[in-house]
Amino acid sequence: IAGDMTAHSQAIVQTRKQLKGNAGTSPHQVAQIYGQMLQQIRHREAEDRILAPLGLNMETFISQQKEMSKQTVDRLLTQLQDYEGEPTEAIVVGFDTATNYADLYEVDQRGTARCYTDIGFAAIGNGARLSSTQLMSLPYSNEWALARTLAALYSAKKLAEMSPNVGRSTDVSLITRDGVRAIWPNAVAKLDDLRQRYQVETEKLTSAALGELQAFFD
């Protein structure tokens, strides 16, 4: 999750209640339910912020519209429709036992769930644009082997750290048909070591290429 933690806290609690006892729920259904919970939270916030100061709620606003001027109704409707609140985004990923395949969904600010399974990656938060650009430029494929995938993922995460408020620590989890578990304890350290060595070699190659280009111009 990324964005307003208070909204996410409420949405997680409500989603868990909806899912209680439904062991066969697919990632798609979870994403849709989570999006609906976020929408409900935003609707309540909009009602509290826009209608409550006027002594109204959604029910009384609908029932009393005939007693209001058209301008007032239009203004309130526009405010309600345009209300977004604090940013909230979520990624839902899991193994679908019905299809025997892993699914990936992103839930956006408006609570809309979009499928990213075929794309193979999703990113949210302040560093989303940088990390997504990195993965697209490779170009990443969800058919890659584990080592190549982890290298691309870690590289994208480190690039995202250039954005404000993106933490430098990195956790990596593997989600399979058997459940969720953290990756091997020394894997992230190995990824970081290889990345630093890769950067050193890349800088050498860049310097050599620029030197050759300057010599050509000279």
Image (spheres, rainbow, N blue to C red):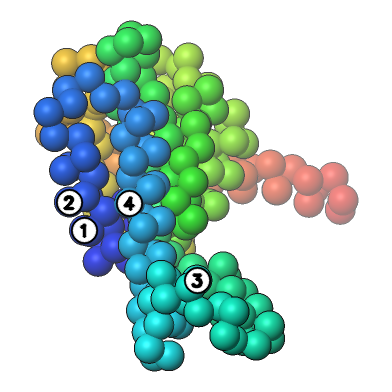
Instruction: Give the CA distance from mark 2 to mark 1.
Output: 6 Å
In percent of width and height, residue 45 lies at 36, 72
Mark 3 or mark 2, which has the lower sequence index? 2
Residue for point 40% across, 82% down: 56
Q: Please name the residue that numbered disc 3 is placed on.
A: 62
> For the residues carrying marks 4 and 1, which lies nearer the camera in this image?
4
Is residue 178 left or right of 66 when viewed as pictured? left
Residue 125, above or below 201: below
Neighbor class of circle 3 (other Cα within 10 Å; few <14, some 14-19, many 20+) is few
Instruction: Give the CA distance from mark 1 to mark 3.
Output: 30 Å
Q: Please name the residue that numbered disc 2 is placed on.
A: 13
Residue 37: numbered disc? 4
In percent of width and height, residue 77 lies at 58, 74
Q: Please name the residue that numbered disc 1 is placed on.
A: 9
Whether tag 2 and tag 1 are in contact, CB under 8 A, the answer is yes
Q: Which one is in front, 96 or 1?
A: 96
> For the residues carrying marks 2 and 1, which lies nearer the camera in this image?
2
